[in-house]
Image: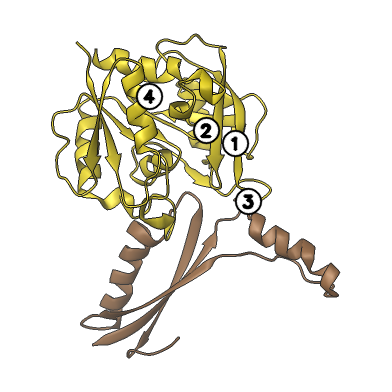
Chain colours: A brown, B yellow
Amino acid sequence: MKFTVLVDVRLRSGIADPAGATIERALPALGYEGVSGVSVGKTIRFTIDAADEQQAISHSEDLRDSFLTNPVIEDAEVTVSPGAGDL
Amino acid sequence: MSGVVGVVVFPGSNCEMDCIESVSRLGGEGRLLWHGDEDLGGVDAVIVPGGFAHGDYLRPGAIARFSPAMNAVERFAAAGGPVVGICNGFQILTEAGLLPGALQKNRGLKFLCQPSMIRVETSESSLTSRASTGDELSIPINHFEGNYTCDDETLARLNDEDRVVLRYVDNPNGSVDDIAGVCNEGRNVVGLMPHPERACNDLLGSSDGSVLLGSLLDMVA
């Protein structure tokens, strides 16, 4: 079966996020007030073949932990949905 | 009789010839190694050079660490062989788990390319045996992701074990505890963000890098 996987990578709390901070500082100049907590991460999408959803999750989490993130500075959440499509 | 220093080349490396040239000027022999090779051809020391291996895609060093040559470097390091990672090479060694911590984006989000004063914090490493603790060296930096970070426990351990090899005199990038370079437990693997290979000739503004790469050559003489 095919599953679509989305990996949402964020910087861990306590890790400096200069991109997020720079965007947040720019917002008032553009007229947007009251926006805080801006953080910049990345999303990685792929399709995976697996026997069932549990295996798709397990493989995707292995991939996340061994390659897609650096646990020293990043956390990531994996979302798996059936079928090959957009997430 | 001088040793042979292997310089691992990845797609996107760009400092390999500077390393070869500097090693040669210092009386050693440099040899290029290809990232796809599964052995190191019997070299006596390894430099993982700067650049943008695999385009720095995903994270700097994240893809390079899976190269066949890096498996060989891991075995070489485990056997006590001297390994130095410079800039992108430092990032690759942290991604490979040969050195602790990680390099995040510079504080201030600026790419930094400038001379930098670096203080030697220990002479007990494969890169600093010719130097004395407290020596200050002018060596250029050239990076966007050079802001060294690690958790508190790791930092305490690095300090307790005297494994911070180099510190910035005037921290340019936000690195925790002003760290510019660290070594592994065996002290044979060293990673640093500054580029000693670009400071081995007075024509380039400084030859202070000679003491560092000269130390590496002493390891293999």
| Cα–Cα span, label 2 and label 3 | 17 Å
Q: Is residue A3 visible?
A: yes
Identify the secondary structure beneath mark 3.
loop
Specify the subunit that label 4 lies on.
B
The part of the image, by quadrant, that contains residue A4 is bottom left
| Cα–Cα span, label 4 and label 3 | 35 Å
* Residue that badge 3 annotates: A16
Q: Looking at the picture, which amino acid does disc 2 mark? A: Leu
Mark 4 touches mark 3? (CB < 8 Å): no
State the image coordinates of residue A62 (x, y, percent, origin top left). 31, 64
**Mark 4 and mark 2, same subunit?**
yes
* Residue that badge 2 annotates: B155
Specify the subunit that label 2 lies on.
B
Task: Give me the residue at 46% from left, 41% from top.
Answer: B101
* Nearer the camera: disc 2 or disc 3: 3
| Cα–Cα span, label 3 and label 1 | 11 Å
| Cα–Cα span, label 4 and label 1 | 30 Å
How many C-alpha atoms fall within 10 Å of the one at disc 2: few (<14), some, or many (≥20)? some
Horizontal arrangement in the rendering, residue B69 relative to residue A15 (left or right):
left
* Residue that badge 1 annotates: B176
Q: Looking at the picture, which amino acid does disc 3 mark? A: Ala
Q: Is residue B157 visible?
A: no
State the image coordinates of residue A80 (x, y, percent, origin top left). 38, 81
Mark 2 touches mark 1? (CB < 8 Å): yes
Task: Give me the residue at 36% from left, 30% from top.
Answer: B19
Horizontal arrangement in the rendering, residue B45 relative to residue A61 (left or right):
left
Q: Looking at the picture, which amino acid does disc 1 mark? A: Val
The numbered dot on residue B205 is none
The numbered dot on residue B22 is 4
* Nearer the camera: disc 4 or disc 3: 4
Please tell me whether residue A2 is drawn above or below residue B47 in the rendered image: below
| Cα–Cα span, label 4 and label 2 | 32 Å
